[in-house]
Image (cartoon, rainbow, N blue to C red):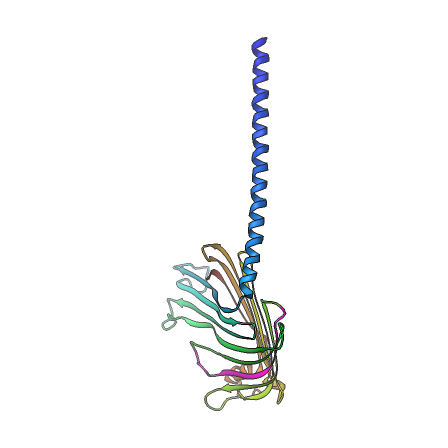
Amino acid sequence: MKKIIFFFVLAFLSISIKAQSIDALKKELHAKKDSIATLQAKAKKIENKLATLPGWKLGAFGTVGASFSGFKNWYARNAPDANAATIGITVNSFANLITEDFFWRNSGSINLGWVKLDDKTIVGDEDFDTASDVFTLSSLYGKRLNKKWAISGLGEYRTTLIDNFNNPGYLDLGAGLTWTPTNHLVVVMHPGNYNFVFSKGDTVFESSLGAKFVADYTNKYGGLSVKSNVSLFQSYKDTNLTNWTWTNSFGYTLWKGIGLGFEIGLRNNKQEALNNALIANPMETFTTLDNKLQTYWLFGLSYGF
């Protein structure tokens, strides 16, 4: 009987000690998490202070996406013997000089994509075709009136790199005001802007005077990098010459700057739409044109530094 009682007492003590050990570990883990949260908050404050200090700020991030597939005697397909592949690359970079009296913000972005469907029964379709092709450079200089407002001048160039470089190409040069309510948001309002359009041969593209509006937002939320940019040109001469582009890029870091990325772009440009429609219908005009929204997107591995 004594042995039974001793056994139960020993088992009870063992359970109690184990429970106390678990409770102690839970308390220690909770304290460590609180310490980590405090350190992260302090690190965020230091990053915000660094962002406000004068001097050059450099950075870049982007996305690489690719897929490859092959089929042989796969009779459920219309092309049972074929190889398919898609490749996409995006790069977003910036070099900003920020001082108390002025700022000089420079940025560049590239989005390139290729697609291939090689049907083995057809000769001549082995090469990659261009799927997306976007290249943009911008430079914004501002002389501060106060902490949030500045008199500014902007130069922005947009074209393609792989196909039809500078045909068309768009160069915006203008002046006006820039509003910087935070370190992460820049809003450009230039009522005086000339939109130069470069093209070869007899085309529908035309340069004109107008207003330029740009809003650029760049920030980091922990491991998530976010960049959103909208660029609008409103022509004073003809609304058919108005165009806008809106791109959004997201990159989430998983390990040493490598993670997952997603980018989506939207564009409305009636001159580009008409130029493309004239290939199939030479009688097409701005009046009869079905100007559909242009879009692209890319998902894949991201990188940042």
Between 71 and 36, which is closer to the camera in this rendering? 36
Q: Is residue 267 left or right of residue 199?
A: right
Between 116 and 251, which is closer to the camera in this rendering? 251
Between 11 and 292, which is closer to the camera in this rendering? 11
Magenta residue check for 98: no
Residue 8 in the image: state x and y as whole percent: 59, 16
Residue 65 in the image: state x and y as whole percent: 46, 63
| Above or below 227: residue 170 | below
**In this picture, which residue range is highlighted in magenta?**
163-181
Q: Residue at x 44, y 62 (%)?
A: 66
| Above or below 15: residue 303 | below
Which quarter of the rendering shows the N terminus?
Answer: top right
Q: Is residue 304 left or right of residue 248?
A: left
Q: Residue at x 45, y 64 (%)?
A: 78
Magenta residue check for 173: yes
The answer to which quarter of the image holds residue 208 is bottom right
